[in-house]
Image (cartoon, rainbow, N blue to C red):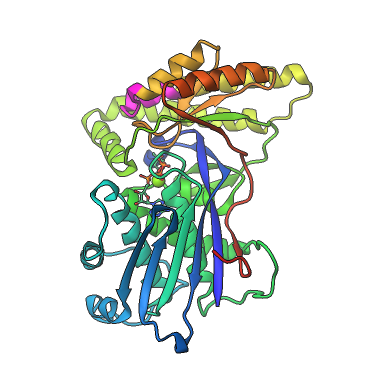
C-alpha cells in the first residue's frame, strides 16, 4: 500500500512576521511542491524499520521500530484524529533519536525537519515499519515555505493511510481531501511547523493545505477571490537563513520596544487589508488594472519599509530592491527575510524585453530568478503515483 501527497510552497504578499503578532497577512500558494510518499512493507519483506529518505538531498535516516518503541517507552496508541503538541520531554526523546543519525554539518538545519517527521509519524501512525520518501521543488530555508510544505505533505500521507479515513484507493491521479480532512492535516502540520519554527503563525501550513490566496489573522483564514492576475518575479538571494531565529529576533525587538513595534504591526495590518481589498475588487478596464498595480506596488514598498523596521531585511535584499528600482519596479522580501527570497511585481504592461533585462542584471549579481504560478491548488494526494 502506498500513497503520495504533494503540498505547495507559498509567497507572502504582505504581513510576514507581523502575522505572528496578530496582524493580518496575505499569502498565495505557488506551483512548486514538496512530495511525500508513504509505503508500508509487506510481512514477507521482513523489514522492521522506519526509514526517511530525503531523495534530492541524497540522505536516508533509519530507525528500527524497536528502537523507537524503547525511546518512547512504548507510550501506547496513537491518535490520528486528535492533533497534539510535542511536549518538551518528547522533544528530548526525539532529539536523541535524531542525534543517532548522520546529518552532515553543512545540513544540520535538517535536524528540525527530521524531528517534525518523527513526531508526526509516531503520533499519526504509531510504531509501524514504513518507508517515507520526500522530494521537493522548493529551495529549503528561502522564505517559500518549504518547512510548511514538508509538514503538510507528511501529515497528509500519514493521515491518508491511517485507520480513521475512508478514501477511494482506486482513484486515478491527484485527489483532493474533503474539508474536514484538510483541517485535520492543517492542524497536524501546524504541530510540525512548531517544531521547526518555534512560534509559527500558521499562515504557511494553512496556505499550503488550502491553496489559492488567503487572508490570515490570529489563526483564522479567509479565502480570497482574486480579481487580479498578479505576476511576481521571485528572486532567491541564495543567502541562507533560518525562520526560527528571525521570528525570535522580531519578538526580542518587540520586547525591547513594545510601543514602536505595536505601531509597526498595526501599520502592516492596514497594508494587508488594503492589499486584499485591491486584489479582490473588480477592475473594469486596462487602465483600472494599471492603477491597481500602482497601488499594490506602493503597498509592497511600505511593507518592505516596515520589515526593515523589524530588522529582517538584509544587504542582499537591498541589492535586489536597488536593482529593480532602476527599472521602476517595486520589491519586498517574502517569508522570514534575512536573505532568502524577494518578490518584484511585474506589471502587465511591462515588456518581455525589460523583464529579461531585469532578470539578467539580478542573475549577474549571483541571484536566481523564477516566475511561479500563483494561487493554484493546495494539498493533493495520489494512490497510483509512485515516488
Ligand atoms: N524537504 C525537506 N526535507 C527535510 N527537511 C525539510 C524539508 N523542507 C523543509 N525542511 C525543514 O525546514 C527547514 C527550513 O524551514 P524554514 O527555515 O522555515 O524556511 P522555509 O520554510 O522558508 O523554507 C529546513 O532546515 C528543514 O529542517
Ligand atoms: C516570518 C513568518 O511570517 C513566515 C515565515 O515563512 P518562511 O518559513 O520563511 O517561508 C513566520 C510565520 O508566520 O510563522
Ligand atoms: Mg518555514
Q: Which residues are magenta?
A: 303-315
**Which of the pair 218/208 is nearer the observer?**
208
- Give the prevailing secondary structure in the magenta stretch: helix
Residue 136 is situated, as x and y percent measured from the top left of the image, at: 48, 51
**Vertical side of 48 occupied by 147: above or below:** above
| Residue occupying image coordinates x 41% and y 25% | 366
| Residue occupying image coordinates x 32% and y 70% | 62
Quarter of the image where one finds residue 334: top left
The answer to whether any part of residue 187 appears in the image is: no
The answer to whether any part of residue 123 appears in the image is: yes
**Vertical side of 209 occupied by 296: above or below:** above
Residue 63 is situated, as x and y percent measured from the top left of the image, at: 30, 73
Residue 256 is situated, as x and y percent measured from the top left of the image, at: 21, 30
**Which of the pair 289/320 is nearer the observer?**
320
Q: Is residue 313 magenta?
A: yes
**Vertical side of 282 occupied by 35: above or below:** below
Q: As drawn, is 357 to the left or to the right of 60? A: right
Quarter of the image where one finds residue 274: top right
Residue 175 is situated, as x and y percent measured from the top left of the image, at: 65, 63
Amino acid at each position: 500500500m502506498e500513497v503520495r501527497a504533494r503540498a505547495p510552497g507559498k509567497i507572502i504578499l504582505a504581513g510576514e512576521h507581523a502575522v505572528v503578532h496578530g496582524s493580518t497577512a496575505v499569502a498565495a500558494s505557488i506551483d512548486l511542491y514538496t512530495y511525500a510518499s508513504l509505503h508500508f512493507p509487506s510481512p514477507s519483506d521482513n523489514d522492521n524499520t522506519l526509514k526517511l529518505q530525503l531523495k534530492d538531498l541524497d540522505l536516508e535516516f533509519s530507525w528500527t521500530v524497536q528502537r523507537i518503541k524503547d525511546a518512547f517507552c512504548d507510550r501506547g496508541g496513537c491518535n490520528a484524529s486528535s492533533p497534539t503538541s510535542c511536549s518538551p520531554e518528547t522533544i528530548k526523546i526525539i532529539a536523541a533519536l535524531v542525534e543517532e543519525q548522520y546529518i552532515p554539518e553543512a545540513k544540520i538545519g535538517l535536524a528540525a525537519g527530521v524531528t517534525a517527521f518523527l513526531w508526526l509519524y509516531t503520533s499519526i501512525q504509531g510504531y509501524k515499519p514504513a518507508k517515507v520518501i520526500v522530494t521537493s521543488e522548493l529551495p529549503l530555508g528561502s522564505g517559500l515555505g518549504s518547512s510548511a510544505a514538508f509538514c503538510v505533505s507528511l501529515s497528509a500521507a500519514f493521515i491518508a493511510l491511517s485507520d480513521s479515513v475512508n478514501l477511494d484507493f482506486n482513484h486515478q491521479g491527484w485527489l483532493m481531501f474533503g474539508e474536514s480532512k484538510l483541517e485535520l492535516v492543517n492542524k497536524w502540520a501546524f504541530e510540525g511547523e512548531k517544531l521547526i519554527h518555534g512560534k509559527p503563525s500558521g499562515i504557511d501550513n494553512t496556505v499550503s493545505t488550502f491553496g489559492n490566496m488567503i487572508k490570515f489573522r490570529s489563526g483564522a483564514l479567509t479565502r480570497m477571490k482574486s480579481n487580479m492576475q498578479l505576476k511576481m518575479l521571485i528572486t532567491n538571494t541564495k543567502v541562507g537563513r533560518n525562520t526560527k531565529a528571525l521570528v525570535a529576533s522580531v519578538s526580542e525587538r518587540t520586547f525591547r520596544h513594545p510601543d514602536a513595534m505595536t505601531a509597526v504591526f498595526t501599520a502592516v495590518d492596514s497594508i494587508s487589508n488594503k492589499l486584499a481589498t485591491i486584489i479582490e475588487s473588480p477592475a473594469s478596464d486596462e487602465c483600472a488594472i494599471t492603477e491597481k498595480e500602482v497601488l499594490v506596488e506602493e503597498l509592497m514598498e511600505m511593507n518592505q519599509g516596515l520589515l526593515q523596521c523589524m530588522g529582517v531585511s538584509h544587504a542582499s535584499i537591498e541589492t535586489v530592491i536597488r536593482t529593480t528600482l532602476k527599472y521602476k519596479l517595486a520589491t519586498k522580501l517574502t517569508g522570514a527575510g534575512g536573505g532568502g527570497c524577494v518578490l518584484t511585481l511585474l506589471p502587465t504592461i511591462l515588456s518581455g524585453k525589460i523583464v529579461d533585462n531585469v532578470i539578467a542584471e539580478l542573475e549577474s549579481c549571483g541571484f536566481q530568478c523564477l516566475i511561479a504560478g500563483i494561487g493554484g491548488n493546495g494539498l493533493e494526494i495520489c494512490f497510483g503515483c509512485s515516488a
